[in-house]
Image (cartoon, grey):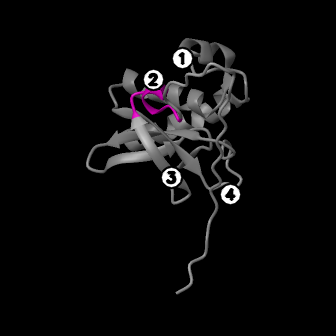
Amino acid sequence: MVFKYVQRINSFLQSFLTYEVNATTPQTTVPEIVQLQKGVCQDYAHLFIAIMRHYSIPARYVSGYLNQGKQYIGAAAMHAWVEVYIPATGWLGIDPTNNIFVNDNYIKVAHGSDYIDCMPVKGIYLSNSGGTTLYTVKITEEQQNQ
């Protein structure tokens, strides 16, 4: 029963939200996401988690990377998805942004209760002069010779 409910909510979010970069920030709240009806992967994940928790279904926020050669939405940068606890099965990864279950194309970096627990870059940068940091990660599939 929980599994089918998770599938229905995942499909619902595809029709309810529109993926739009810069529509929100990491500080956007769930009520704001519902009002805007658009956002990025972290917004899909936060709304999905809020719905799960409302019905007492354990859910957690996951951040990581996607195989960039597979045409997934959100693969160009760090990506967010959800893990839901299914009784008698355990934690199951689901990506509401792409409306699919997590597979071998996902690389999990961290999980926690929300974005704050899994921010891609944390720390303090102190400098007397101006400065910026830049990082990139490229994820691709590689054939192994046997």
Residue for point 67% across, 54% down = 68
Which comes sooner in the sequence, label 3 or label 4?
4
Callouts 1 and 2 close, C-beta under 8 Å: yes
Task: Identify the residue under disc 3.
Answer: 107
Which comes sooner in the sequence, label 2 or label 4?
2
Callouts 4 and 1 close, C-beta under 8 Å: no
Task: Identify the residue under disc 2.
Answer: 50
Q: Mark 2: give few (<14), some (14-19) or many (20+) Cα within 10 Å.
A: some
Q: Is residue 144 above or below residue 98?
A: below
Q: Mark 3: give few (<14), some (14-19) or many (20+) Cα within 10 Å.
A: some
Question: Where residue 30 is drawn, which disc sits there?
Answer: 1
> Would residue 87 appear left or right of 62 to someone viewing this image?
left
* CA–CA distance in space, label 1 to label 2: 8 Å
Q: Which residues are magenta?
A: 112-120
Q: Position of residue 3 (x, y in %)?
A: 40, 43
> Would residue 73 appear left or right of 46 to someone viewing this image?
right
Question: Where residue 70 is drawn, which disc sits there?
Answer: 4
Which comes sooner in the sequence, label 4 or label 1?
1
Q: Mark 4: give few (<14), some (14-19) or many (20+) Cα within 10 Å.
A: few
Q: Is residue 146 above or below residue 45?
A: below
Q: Secondary structure at mark 2?
A: helix
* CA–CA distance in space, label 2 to label 4: 28 Å
